[in-house]
């Protein structure tokens, strides 16, 4: 079973700042997904990356997939309080099952 | 298009009791997966159901069992509850082999075992 390491575990920043969170594995990802989870809710899918070196943008969020497909990053520009939540990465096997990291808890203060 | 709905939202049970959690999958999705999320951790895979049969299981004991019905809804049953079973139980629906599209999660059932 592939283990996903996410860093940092906790991040607290002021509104308007930029930030990057990371997801790493010792094995190659088949595909990687990023989710955001708010308190009391289930995770919501943000993006799927499949190809090594791929970059995807979702408004102020930029997702990168490492060339070797063993790491990924999520960069948020000009963070807003609404970005507060738990950011999870997940590796999805060909059988349709996902292995999740323990996430990065982001707090954006107004 | 309806999302994934789970019931109940919160539940308190006593150690040793049994519990049944329910999930209605998103319209058009034929696969349901169950996850356990302990406080401060990511979701852990319990098992997956496809066409009413178990299609993979995580590292959970047999007292965790499930069902999927012809309408793709699902139940998670836990027998002989232990204190460590206290967690958020998440149901996620998907199309089989649609790894690219990820899961649609419900809001979860918060189970507290006392």
Image (cartoon, grey):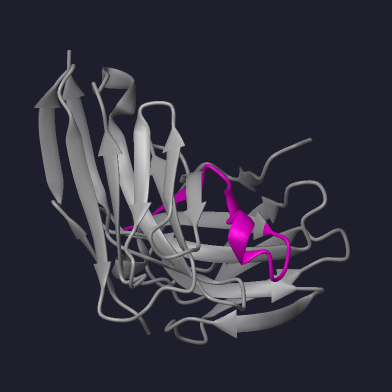
Taking the spot 41% from the left edge, 65% from the top edge, the residue there is A52
Q: Which residues are magenta?
A: B94-114
Q: Residue at x 51, y 75 (%)?
A: B79
- Residue toward you, A93 or A74: A74
Residue A36 image-quadrant placement: top left
Q: Quadrant of residue B101?
A: bottom right
Q: Position of residue B93 (x, y in %)?
A: 66, 56
Q: Residue furthest top?
A: A110
Q: Position of residue B2 (x, y in %)?
A: 75, 37
The correct choice, above or below, for A107 with respect to B68 in the image is above
- Viewed as shown, does residue B69 lie left or right of B105? right
> In x, y percent, where is residue B3?
69, 40
Residue A73 on the magenta span: no
Q: Position of residue B33 (x, y in %)?
A: 60, 65
Q: Nearer the viewer, residue A63 or B74?
A: A63
Decide if residue A39 is in sight here. no
Depth check: give the residue in front, B25 or B110: B25
Q: Is residue B59 visible?
A: yes
């Amino acid at each position: 079973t592939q283990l996903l390491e996410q860093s940092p575990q906790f991040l607290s920043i002021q509104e308007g700042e930029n930030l990057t969170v990371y997801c790493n594995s010792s094995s190659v990802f088949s595909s990687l997904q990023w989710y955001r989870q708010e308190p009391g809710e289930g995770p919501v899918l943000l993006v799927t990356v499949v190809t090594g070196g791929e970059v995807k943008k979702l408004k102020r969020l930029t997702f990168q997939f490492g060339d070797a497909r063993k790491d990924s990053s999520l960069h948020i520009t000009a963070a807003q309080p609404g970005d507060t939540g738990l950011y999870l990465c997940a590796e999805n096997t060909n059988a349709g099952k996902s292995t999740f990291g323990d996430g990065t808890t982001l707090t954006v203060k107004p | 298009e309806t999302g994934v709905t789970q019931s109940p939202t919160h539940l308190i049970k006593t150690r040793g009791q049994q519990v049944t959690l329910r999930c209605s999958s998103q319209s058009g999705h034929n696969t349901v997966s169950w996850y356990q999320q302990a406080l401060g951790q990511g979701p852990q895979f319990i098992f997956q159901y496809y066409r009413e049969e178990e299609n993979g299981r995580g590292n959970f004991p047999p007292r965790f069992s499930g069902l999927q019905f012809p309408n793709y809804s699902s139940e998670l049953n836990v027998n002989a509850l232990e204190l460590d079973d206290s967690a958020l139980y998440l149901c996620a629906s998907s199309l089989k082999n649609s790894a690219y599209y990820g899961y649609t999660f419900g809001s979860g059932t918060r189970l507290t075992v006392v």
